[in-house]
Image: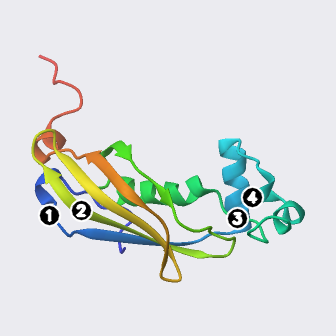
Amino acid sequence: MSTPFKIYYFEDLSLGMRETLMKAVMDDDVIAFADLSGDRNPIHLSDHFASKTRFGERIVHGLYTAALISTVIGMYLPGPGSVYLSQTLNFRAPVKIGDVINVVVEVVELVEKGRRAKLKCECLVDGKVVLDGEAIVMVPSREQASRPAVPASA
């Protein structure tokens, strides 16, 4: 992605459009997410605790991974002005600290009424799907974007 964000209006979208984001998850990210969310489960924060689990080491919060989908939707496809209506999530495999997550969001359906877009969402690590699901978002029209936010005074 060459720009800090993209804005697509409903009229700009077409089936098969996709955007991606790559993010290396670091220890500081996990700690910040734990602080922000309040989820301080030791499987995310304690090497000692996590070493005794089936994963053998700390894992990244599943919703941290899912939040990266929100980044793509809110900043790149459709981008600023789009509003989440729903999201399904299937957690397929753990993400570990140091993993590079590749987030892929693709337009799979467009519904003119209400300007809805259905998006296929995947997060992959080393080519393996670790999370997938679908999002439904409301996308602004070009006409809506051109309206003044505050009515002109007479």
* Point 59% across, 57% down: residue: 62
Label 3 sits on what residue type? Ile
Residue labelled with disc 1? 14
Element at badge 4? Answer: helix
In the image, is 20 to the left or to the right of 138? right
| Residue to which mark 2 is pinned | 107
**In whole angstroms, how far apart are the C-alphas of marks 2 and 4?**
32 Å
Which is nearer the N-term, disc 2 or disc 4? 4
Circles 3 and 4 in contact, beta carbons < 8 Å: yes
Mark 2 or mark 3: which comes first in sequence? 3
Q: Tell me which numbered mark, 1 or 2, is placed earlier along the sequence.
A: 1
Q: Quadrant of the N terminus?
A: bottom left
The mark found on residue 59 in the picture is 3
In the image, which is nearer the foreground, mark 1 or mark 4? 4
- Residue ranking furthest to the top: 154
**Amino acid at dot 2:** Val
At 18% from the left and 34% from the top, the residue drawn is: 148
Q: Which residue is mark 4?
A: 44
Please tell me whether residue 80 is drawn above or below residue 55 in the rendered image: above
Nearer the observer, disc 3 or disc 1? 3
Nearer to us in this view, 139 or 132: 132
Spatial CA span between label 2 and label 3: 30 Å
Q: How many marks?
A: 4
Answer with the quarter of the image where residue 145 lies. top left
Instruction: Pinpoint residue 12: horizontal percent, then vertical percent.
Output: 14, 59
Q: Are marks 1 and 2 in contact (CB under 8 Å)?
A: yes
Q: How is the image coloured?
A: rainbow
Q: Residues within 10 Å of mark 4 (few under 14, many from 20)?
A: many
Q: Earlier in the sequence, mark 1 or mark 4?
A: 1
